[in-house]
Image: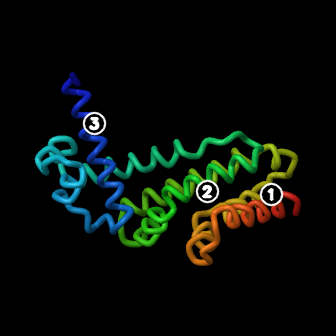
Amino acid sequence: MRSRAESAGLTRRRALEATVALAGEKPFATIVLPEVAARAGVSVQTVLRQFGSRDGLLDAATEFVAEQLRSHRSSPPGDVRAALEVLFDHFDDHGDAVIMLLGQEGWDRRAAQLTESERQAHRAWVSTVFAPQLAERSVAVRTELIDMLVVATDVYTWKLLCRDRTLSRSTAQRRVSRMVSAILSAA
């Protein structure tokens, strides 16, 4: 039999997952507690008991998403193929929701915080993953190359290739790989 704490933890996670799923479908501002509760299979009162308020739920969901996104991005430094696999897995799972969040950042505080955090995380990921290829470059050249690699591996690049151009994942990934190779060999 589950302990009360374990059960509460599972309830909390279901509510967070329901909120994240809804955030992938609609703007943060339109997410309401009854919808979250129904999707999580709990009552509104249970959601309130876990998070205190709608704002508490949305703040917790924002942190939950940020943590999930960080944990999905591990790949060995220097292994471009593995890095692009991880990146495309991440975009296949979360890219559409990220694009939706980016559309809200101008008017929603939580979306702006999450997207800014993710911009910084993406740049740090690029710096780490490509560190071996960038190590011998001057600081100025390394900074320029990181800027270019951030653009080549950005969610908007994925959107342009996979959503707008409707290319297959393998074709889009190959094109991003060619961009990355061209950038790394350019300087």
Cα–Cα gap, marks 3 and 1: 48 Å
User: Do callouts 2 and 3 mark residues in contact (Cβ within 8 Å)?
Assistant: no
Instruction: Name above or below for residue 131 compared with residue 101.
Output: above
- Give me the C-alpha separation between circle 2 and circle 3: 29 Å
Query: What amino acid does circle 3 point to?
Result: Leu
Identify the residue shown where x is 58% and y is 53%. Answer: 89
- Tell me which residue sits at (24%, 39%) in the image: 11
Rendered-image quadrant of the C terminus: bottom right
Give the class, few, some or many, for how many residues have Cα within 10 Å of label 2's Cα (few <14, many ≥20).
many
Nearest-to-viewer mark from 3 and 1: 3
Q: Residue at x 23, y 31 (%)?
A: 7
Crowd tier of the residue under label 1, counting other residues whose Cα lies within 10 Å: few below 14, some 14–19, many 20 or above: few
The kind of residue tagged 2 is Phe
Q: Secondary structure at mark 2?
A: helix
Image coordinates for residue 144, horizontal then vertical, percent? 77, 61
For label 1, the residue is: 140
The residue that mark 3 highlights is: 10
In the image, what residue type sits under mark 1? Ala
Q: Label 2 near label 1: C-beta < 8 Å?
A: no
Could you say whether the residue bearing mark 3 is in a helix, strand or loop? helix
Q: Quadrant of the N terminus?
A: top left
Residue corresponding to mark 2: 88
What percent of the width, then of the height, locates residue 46?
Answer: 14, 44
| Residue 101 picture location, percent across and down | 43, 65
Q: Give the label on residue 38, or none.
A: none
